[in-house]
Amino acid sequence: MTSHIEALFNAAPLLALFITLALGYIAGKLTIGRFVLGGIAGTLLMGVLMGQFNVQIDSGIKSIFFALFIYAVGYQGGPQFAQALNLKSLNQLISAFVMCASGLACVLLAAWWFNLDRGTAAGLAAGGLTQSAIIGTAGDAIAKLDVSAEAAKTMQTNVAVGYAVCYIFGSLGPIIMATWFFPMVMGWDIRAEAKKREQEISGDHPALEPGEFNAIERIATRVYRLDENSDWRGMSVEQANRAMRDAAVEGIYRNGELASPSASVTLERDDLVILTGQIESLHRARGHLGDEVEAPDDSFLVEEERDIVLSNKQLVGKTVGHIHDHVNIDVRSGVYLKAIRRMGHELPVSSDLELHRGDELLFTGRPQDLDRALSKVGYKISAAAVTDFIFFGIGMAFGILLGMIEFRIAGIPVTIGSGGGCLLSGLLFGWLRSTHPRYAALPTGASNFLRDFGLAVFVGIVGLSAGPQALTTIQEQGLTLLLLGAGVTILPQLFTFYFSYYVLQIKNPIDALGCLVGGRSANPGFAALLEKAGNATPVVPFTVTYAVANVFLTLWGPIIVGVVSTNP
């Protein structure tokens, strides 16, 4: 039976790859308490098992998909990474770098003390610091070493083995430290602190469970009949809109017909005036109009919800309230902000919330009103529904060229490889897209697919290639690697937390814990922290530190391979 399966996979190695992906993501859904293995770690483990059938897949496929993955990561993080590099978030920026640097120091110390080879050391970093991208950047660097092909393959296998052994506690560690250990030691109640923090910035809106929504809308549409006592009779639509702070006339029913609400139209008795805006503004307007009535049966008012990415540098760094109060009424009339997302996470809409370049702002209003505001804010996400393959090709080529550059650290030749080069190129072109929206379009759906599928294919091939030797290595070094991985996971968090708290003065509990998980790019830890917090308050410190950590942790791969000198 084994020989038949092996023959089948030799004839169609991609069959083994896609079976590995399917089984890996099935395994990744298994839950033990709060711990979920995840699709990537599951795919690696399934790849190791499937690799026992001696599946041979061209290594060029692995390189291509890793380059696509890492470029997409850089592209998506480019706007936020650039935004993070400013004085306002300097303490959080330093916190992230200290976390990354202390993690690197722990790995190098473990490699020296236990005489780990380059591949095992890089795998220890990838798993202990839960940065899957290190597998690729370290693998690229190993391939360029002046060693035998057999030694290079052994080290690349050890990268995958080290990652697989250390990843489980690497994922659990930040969850334990951020949601139990530090809150216990510091005497913090995460939920209470999150409510207090949210009250500071947004007035304490409750968190919602999946499927729940806030039934009390901030923005609504109402119909009022203009009666004989209305002081708005004879007033133009433009004058009425100026009289209201956060509402606008969206339509007028006159003699059974829907009339255009152009600025010069005059309001008359018995008009059915359709207003859209914030609830409190509608209540105020009611006193000037008349009774609220039901809309006619055949009434139809077209409105649109539109996601706009903030790129106008004049608005970056300003608060929502400041922009609202200082933007010309002609620009914001009929345009209403409903939600704000940053790096895929929704933020509480608050007048005190500071906007960053690359934030996704969800507006509602008539298409013509949104068109008017669009040029003042940024660019429409749906307008970028087609990938700009010119800049995509240039970006990938530029990244590969960057990866070919060799530099020296203490006399040791080091190269960041195509993975590190494509990461930097992605950051550059992602930033370019946020500042010049006509160029370098890579839609969110496309970039998400490149990121997720690219990493899944890459990790699957790594597992398949490492399979024949991986089980032997786990038997020989498994316990040692597991304990070293626990040290690499815990020690940088201990050092960085207290350094950030006492030296950098990041004393707000939510900010401190958000920086802790973000500085490790620990998505499971962040998810657990969000669950404990019960609201979105950890998102802002997490995004700043996460963007920085993603870059530095990824670049540690070739650094480790260059500094560690032991070969198997």
Image (spheres, rainbow, N blue to C red):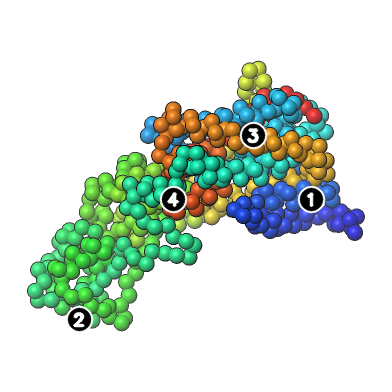
**Mark 4, residue position:** 191
Identify the residue shown where x is 18% and y is 75%.
Answer: 291
In the displayed structure image, the side of residue 137 where residue 464 appears, left or right: right
Residue at point 18% right, 66% down?
285
SS type, badge 4: helix
Label 1 vs label 3: CA separation?
A: 27 Å
Q: Quadrant of residue 237?
A: bottom left
Q: Which residue in the structure is indicated by mark 3?
A: 487
Check if mark 2's residue and mark 1's residue have beta carbons within 8 Å.
no
Q: Which mark is in front, 4 or 2?
A: 4
Of 372 and 103, which appears nearest the observer? 103
Of circles 4 and 1, which is in front? 4
Q: The C terminus is located in which quarter?
A: top right
Q: Secondary structure at mark 3?
A: helix
Above or below, 508 relative to 408: below
Marks 2 and 3: in contact by CB < 8 Å? no
Frontmost of labels 2 and 1 is 1
User: If you read the primary sequence from the N terminus, does the residue marked by circle 4 or circle 2 appear first?
Assistant: 4
Q: Marks 4 and 3: in contact by CB < 8 Å?
A: no
Q: Which residue is mark 2?
A: 255
User: Can I make out residue 492 in this image?
Assistant: yes
Q: Earlier in the sequence, mark 3 or mark 4?
A: 4
Measured as percent of width and height from the top left, residue 61 is found at 72, 46
Q: CA distance from mark 4 to mark 1?
A: 42 Å
User: Which residue is found at the position 74% from the left and 52% from the top?
Assistant: 46
Question: What number of labels is visible?
Answer: 4
Instruction: Measuring from the top left, give residue 130's x and y in whole percent.
Output: 62, 41
